[in-house]
Amino acid sequence: MTEKSLFGTTADGRQVFAYRLSNRNGVSATILDYGCTLQSVCIPLHGKTVDVCLGYDTVREYEQNDGYLGAIVGRYAGRIPKATLKLGEQVYPLCQNDGENHLHGGRIGFDKAIFDAELSEHAVCLSHVSPDGDEGYPAALSVRIVYTLTDDDVLTIRCEGVSNGTTVWNPTSHAYWNLNGHDSGSALDHTLCIPAERYVPTDDALIPLAGEAPVSDTPFDFRIPKTFRNALKTPCAQIRNGFDHSFVLSPGTIGLAGTRGIRIQITTDCKAVQLYTANFLSERIGKGGVRYAPHHAVCLETQSRQIGRDLIVPEESLLSANEMKSHTTAFRFLYR
Ligand code: GAL
């Protein structure tokens, strides 16, 4: 079932709507047309409803706070070093919104756009056109983001892009998961499993150093499930204030489990996932007056491989004129 309701109004007077998808088991997901934001995911557990994703109750908080809570970030998720996009011989200066680098699509990325929405029985399809030159990116880019919730408790997020010229494209969902409930504090006791043999070490500005490195004998080895707390016990210069790194995915399922019986299994056709333990989630008030703070959530941002210091754009995020690219990530919720 899908329902539409008015969520609020932006500072400049535009209406923001909420789309609530629900299934026969009582699982629901609420998506805003503002930023294509996943505002809540509610799971029934022992007669109660647990909201497992961090967010806000008002448009104003989404407009004013940093952190991209639940948004689809883009055009390009992650950092582009020196805010310099190199496509063949052409160099495009992008908006510098993270020191000298470009982050998550710039100052006014997808997370700040109001998408056009279309509802169907189990899905909401959100579309948006980012004009040529938007935040410095070349070519006009049309995106469609489709959220679907099935009766077997799978929430899929499909991202489709087509442009009228050569450009880059790498959106992701920046959902902040806390499977014990968004109001339950630290998520460091969650258990994570990532089928990845390699991760990408970074410098202090979180820009990739020299390519990928093996996970073996590092805290980045999540091939066998472990808690963040345990992983963080192994000393490692790469761990600054938690995890904030890209993993190159092998075939398999990413698993995240809370301590109260809710788990997610994530499958994707993306080549990489950014693991971010909400290190920069400064103290703030979220939904229902709840206090959020660093490490209160885990983001698993499925996306393309990273652009490194050599500025080489991975082929999966290159779009040529009129070519359609897409990727899909499925989140299966398990609870008892
Ligand atoms: C993550 C990124 C972090 C931080 C965060 C937003 O995707 O890896 O470094 O920028 O988004 O606060």
Image (tube, grey):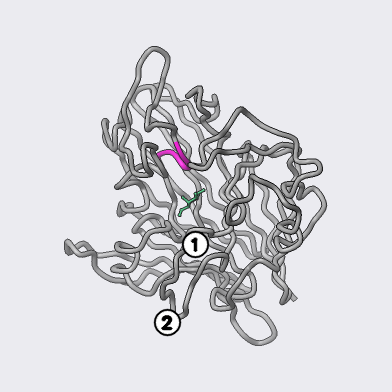
Q: Is residue 50 magenta?
A: no
For the residue pair 119 and 43, the one nearer the viewer reads as 43
For the residue pair 283 and 107, the one nearer the viewer reads as 283
Report x, y in % for residue 323: 45, 25
Q: Residues within 10 Å of mark 2 (few under 14, many from 20)?
A: few
For the residue pair 213 and 28, the one nearer the viewer reads as 213
Report if residue 210 is visible in the image: yes
The quadrant holding residue 177 is bottom right
Q: Is residue 76 magenta?
A: yes
- Label 2 vs 1, first from the N-terminus: 1
State whether residue 325 is above or below residue 187. above
Is residue 310 left or right of 263 when viewed as pictured?
Answer: left
What range of the chain is rendered magenta? 74-79
User: In the rendered image, which residue does mark 1 sit on?
Assistant: 121
State whether residue 16 is above or below residue 85. below
Residue 289's label in the rendered image is: 2
